[in-house]
Amino acid sequence: MLSRIAESLFWMGRYMERAEDTARLLDVHFHTQLEQSQQTYLLRWDSIVNISGEQDRFFECYTEATPHSVVEFLAFRDDNPNSIVNCVTRVRENARTIRERISRELWEDINSFYHRVRAFSPRAEIATGPHRFCTEVKFSCHQFRGVADDTLSHDEGWHFLRAGRALERAEKTARIVDVEYHTLLEGKTERRPDSHQWMAVLKSVAAYEVYRREFHSSIDPQRVAELLVLHPRHPRSIRFNIGELHTSLQAISRASPGTYATEAERLAGRLHETLRYDRIQDVYERGLHDFLRSLQQTCRGIGEHIARTYFYYAVA
Amino acid sequence: MEPHATTAGERSTLLADYDAGGFYDEMFAPGGDPRPHCEPFYDELARMTPAHFEECRRLADLAFLLQGITFTVYSDGLGSERLFPFDLVPRILLRSEWDRIERGLSQRVIALNHFLQDIYGAQRILKDRTIPRSLVQSCRHYRREMTGVAVPRGIYTHVAGIDLVRDSASGEFLVLEDNVRTPSGVSYVLENRLVMTRMFPRAFQRQEVLPIHHYPAELFQVLRGISPRTADPVIVTLTPGVHNSAYFEHTFLAQQMGVELVESRDLVVDGDVVYMKTIRGLTKVDVVYRRVDDEFIDPVAFRPDSLLGVPGLLAAYRAGNVALANAIGTGVADDKAIYAYVPEIIRYYLGEEPVLRNVETYICARPPDLSYVLEHTESLVVKEVGESGGYGMLMGPWASKTAIEEFRTRLKADPRNYIAQPVIQLSRAPSYDVATKRMVGRHVDLRPYCLFDGDRVTIIPGGLTRVALKADSLVVNSSQGGGSKDTWVLRGH
C-alpha cells in the first residue's frame, strides 16, 4: 500500500472522529446549559472552546464565548481548520485523492455527507440551535463507519482508518475529562456543580445510559472518570480506544503476538497495559490531571511515530 | 427508471416544433421523419411527457453529483468543481458509418505511430522533404531528448483520442484534430452509458447497442504489453493530482484496471529505476500510464519548476527500466500544423489513401497561406497549433473587431504558431434545453478512443459525443460550456 494512501486513510479516520466529537459536544451543551444559571452557562462555553484546543484562534475572532460564537466557530467557520464543516471537507478531500482505493459505496457516502453539510445555512443553525445540524453529523459519522466496515476489505488500509479514529477518540476523551474536571471541580464556579453538568459530560460521549446501568448510582465524578478512562468495553473510553489502536498497529506491522516492530506499537502497547491494570484510585493518586496530560503526550508521540515509520521515512 | 407511457400523438410535446434548422441532423432525415435506425429511441422519447423527462434528467444529474463525477474549471480563478453536463438523448450511429470510422482511425493511428518512430529515428520523411524539417523541429512538443531512444515495442501512441465532426454540407465525417498526448474523456463515455442503461432499459432491450465496458481491460493489456518485466509487472497511473481537471478520470481508470494511482510524490528514481513509496518500503515500478504532460513529467529533463514530475524519470525511461504510455514527444504528431500533413503521412508510410478526410487547413507558416488568413480572418477559425481543449482559438464569424485585430497582430508576430480552417457547420442532434424544457438542435462532434498495442488498433464502438449546449455555438469543449451524450453504435445496421 502506498504511503500516501495509508496516510489519507489515517487522517480520514481522525477528521471524521473530530467532526463527530465536536458535534456531540455542541449539541449536548447547547441544550443542557439552557437550564443553567447565566454565569455557569457562559463558563461552560469557555470549556467547550478549551476542549477543541483552539482557544487562541477563537479569541482572535471573538471577545467572548457565547452560544452563538462557539457554535459558529466550532461548526461552521472556514478559518477554523477544525470546524465540523472543515473536518468533513478534509475527509472528502482525502477520500477524493484515494477514491480508486476505497469502495464506491464509501466514496459516495462521504461525498453526499459533504454536500449535505455544505447545504446547511450557518445563520439558521446558529439562530435556532444546532440540533438538526449536529444530529445530521453524528448519524452521518456512524453511517461512515458502517459503510467502511461493511464495504472495505479489512486489510492494512482499513486498520489505518481505524487507528486514526481510535487515536483521535482517545485523545479527545482525555481532553474532555481533563477540561471538565478542571472547570467543574477546581473552584471556578461559586458552588459545587450539580449532577446535570456531569450528565452532560457523559451524554457528550454517549456514555450516560451505560453509566446508569453500570453504577446504579447518582452521578459521582470519580465514577464518571472511571467510566471514561478505564472502562474495558465502552467504545468511547480511553482504554477501549488505546486497545483498538494497539490491535490495528499490530495488524499493520504484522509483529507476532507479545512482540512489537515499531515504536508506535510499543508506546500504544505499554499505555494499554497501564490502562488495563490500573484502578481509578491509582490514577487519582498520581493526580488525574497529570495522568491525562502525560497520556495526551503519549498519544501525540504515537501519531508522530506512525508518520515517521509509514508515511515519511527517508529514502535514498 | 422506466418512463411512463403517454397518449402522445405524432410528436410528444418534447419534440413539438423541433427544427433541424438546415443542418445535418443526427436523428431526423431532411423531411422531418426520424432516420430509420433512430426510430426505436424516437418512439421512446415520443412516449415521454416533459415532466417525466425532466425527472429522468434530475436523477441523472443527481447520480453524477453523488458519485462526484465532476471536472475542474480554471477560468474562474478558483478552480471550482462542476458537473459535466450530460444530455440524455443519445447520438446513434449506423454500423456501416462506424465501420468506416474505425478503418479510418486505425489507419491514422498506425500512420502517426510510424511518423513518430521516424521523426525520433531515421527521419526519412524529413530527408525526403515530404514534410519541412523546420516545421517538425519547431513544434512546441517536439522533444529532442527522445532522438534515438528505442521505446518499448516501438509504440508511441498507446492511446489516441481523435476528434471527428460531421460536415452538414456533405454528411461526411472529417477529422478535426488528433490528440495523442494524454487525451481525456473516456471515463465519461463509460459512466454515461451506465446512467443510460438505468434510465432507458427498454431502449437497450429493443435494439442491440455495441458494448464499451471492455475499455479498461483493453488499456490494461496494452500497458502490460510494454512492460520490461514480463512476470507480474507493477503498473501505475500517474496523475498530476486532485486539482487536475481530469482527476476523476484518473481515479476511474486506475480503479477499473486495478492498478495503483500515484502522484509524483509517491515515486522516486534511484539508479535509473523507478520506485513507489509504500508502507513497507520501495517497490519497483515497470509501467507508468502517465496523465502528466511531457513538460512537467521530469523537472531534471524538462521544466525545472514542475512540482508534478518525478526527477530522473526520463533517464530511467531511456535506460529501458520503465515504460511510459504515451511515449514522451508524441505531441509533435498532434501539432495542428502537422495535422495538415497527416493525409501525406498516411500515403507516405502506408501507401494508402486516407479513409477519413481532413478539414481544409491553412498553415500560417507558409507565406501564401498567411496572407490568405490575414485577409479572411473574419470567416475563418484560427487556432494555436500547440493548444487543445478549445483554448487559444478565434472563431472569426462570431469574434469582435478588436479580437480579430488582436489575432492578426499575433499571427503576424508568430505565424508558425497558427493554423486556420473554414468554419465547418457541424451536424446537430436533438438535445434537451433546460430553460424551455424542450428538445432543440445542438452541434455535436465525436471523439473515439483508440488503443494501439503495436499490432492492431482497438476502438470501443462510439466514443464521446460532445455537444455545444449554447444555442448556435460550435465549440463543444467542456471547458467552454459543452456537454456530452452517450454514443450508440447499433449492431446489424
Image (spheres, coloured by chain):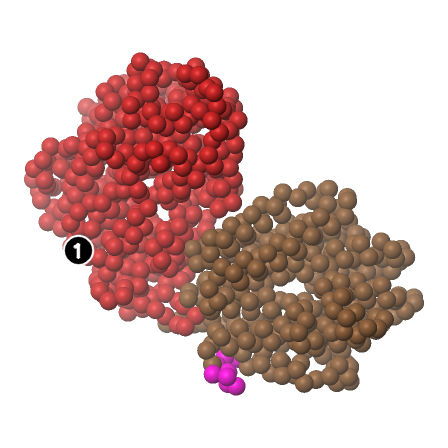
Chain colours: A brown, B red
Is B253 drawn above or below residue A282 in the view shown?
Answer: above
Q: Nearer the viewer, residue B471 or B75?
A: B471
**Magenta part of the chain:** A256-263
Residue B272 point in image, percent of width and height: 27, 66
Is B226 drawn above or below residue A114 in the view shown?
Answer: below
- Where residue A13 sits, quadrant-wise, is bottom right
- Where residue A101 sits, quadrant-wise, is bottom left
Image quadrant occupied by the C terminus of chain B = top left
Residue B48 shown left or right of residue B489 in the figure: right
Is B214 drawn above or below residue A159 in the view shown?
Answer: above
Whether residue A80 is visible: no
| Residue under the point 53% across and 62% down | A149
Circle 1 is placed at which residue position? B153
Give the number of marks: 1
Q: Nearer the viewer, residue A238 or A178?
A: A238
Tag 1: amino acid: Arg
- Where residue A54 sits, quadrant-wise, is bottom right
| Residue under the point 30% across and 36% down | B208
Q: Secondary structure at mark 1?
A: helix
| Residue under the point 37% across and 43% down | B190
Say whether residue A96 is magenta.
no
Residue A24 shown left or right of residue B366 in the figure: right
User: Majority secondary structure of the magenta segment?
Assistant: loop
